[in-house]
Image (cartoon, helix red, strand yellow):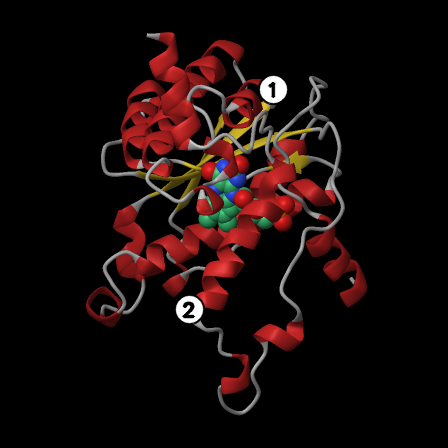
Amino acid sequence: MKYEDFLGLLKNRRTIRHFKPDPLPKGAIEKILEAGRWAMSGGNGQPWEFLVVTDRVTKAKVGAIINGRQERHWALEQTREQRYRHPGHFRPGLVPDQVRMVNEAPALIILLGDPRTFQATVIGNQFFSGEHDIFHMNLGNSAMIMNLAAASLGLGAAWQTIDRPSEHQLKELLGIPLEYKIYVQIPVGYPVKTPPPQYRRTLKEVAHYGKYDKSKYRTHDEIREWLAQCRLGSLPSYDVRKPAQSTIELTKAAKKKK
Ligand SMILES: Cc1cc2nc3c(=O)[nH]c(=O)nc-3n(C[C@H](O)[C@H](O)[C@H](O)COP(=O)(O)O)c2cc1C
């Protein structure tokens, strides 16, 4: 494989949050899982296992759990200044992407981690890198590779974070052993559309040679501006119906209703 082809795959892979109802080609999921199991891992511990959900009824139950996640996150997002607020959380109950993508995607890959494998790596990591760092990095590698594998097959995929309360609910729903961790959920399907490559900071901005180049250090103000820009930049990726609605407006509207 040529470097240009590899880079092309990296650039053209996008997070997809809206899927066509078309079924997946035979064997596509297995190809994605096959790629995921070739990830690097500390001490070759390979903590990953993959749970595939395709049944509509089960997916709807997963969607309901994700809806709970959205409601929880919405509440916390309201404590942030509007310009830093995540676009998926402008209004309660109006977070169609995250629940819709679960229902629409013909398959969900739920990436599980078995923490007992952690001891494959050097024991120093347990003390000096934080108990779970290597474990999570291992799983992150597998998740990223599966997203790329989906893109290489002309399919769309996304990285859907599972928070703690959702994790407990999902484990119960899907009969996952208590000690396992759900690292991430990856809905897979044909994209309704694939947006152009997403913005990334330039190589000039992020690369240092020899020693850290202090001229590239960003001030706290610049970081705050960057965070606000990240929010603006991600707006088009989300199904946001009324992006400008502030908490104050929402409170006013709620009072009026009463
Ligand atoms: C650790 C991590 C967590 C993420 N969580 C979510 C999520 O819960 N829901 C979602 O729709 N996208 C999620 N994303 C996708 C990012 O928003 C997306 O990768 C980013 O905006 C860049 O866009 P791109 O993937 O299209 O290049 C996550 C990505 C990562 C790496």
Measure the alpha-carbon separation of dots 2 and 1. 40 Å
Asked if the beta carbon under badge 2 is closer than 8 A to the nearest atom of ligand 1, the reply is no
Residue at figure coordinates x 58%, y 73% from the top left: 206
Element type at mark 1: helix
Asked if the beta carbon under badge 1 is closer than 8 A to the nearest atom of ligand 1, the reply is no
The amino acid at mark 1 is Glu
Q: Nearer the viewer, residue 95 or 157?
A: 95
Q: Nearer the viewer, residue 121 or 71?
A: 71
Q: Is residue 225 left or right of residue 198?
A: left
**Viewer-nearest of discs 2 and 1:** 2
Give the mark, 2 or 1, whose residue is nearer the N terminus. Answer: 1
Can residue 151 be seen at all in this image of the molecule?
Answer: yes
Instruction: Identify the residue position indicated by label 1 in the image.
Output: 104
**161, above or below 140, in the image:** above
Residue 143 x, y percent position in the rendering: 51, 46
> How many residues crowd mark 1 within 10 Å: few (<14), some (14–19), many (20+)?
many
Q: Nearer the viewer, residue 127 or 45?
A: 127
- Image quarter of the C terminus: top left
Element type at mark 2: helix
**49, above or below 44, in the image:** above
**114, above or below 50, in the image:** below
The amino acid at mark 2 is His
- Image quarter of the N terminus: bottom right
Can you tell which mark lies on residue 220?
A: 2
Can you tell which mark lies on residue 62?
A: none
Residue at figure coordinates x 76%, y 67% from the top left: 3
**179, above or below 26, in the image:** below
Residue 18 x, y percent position in the rendering: 65, 27
Residue 227 x, y percent position in the rendering: 49, 55
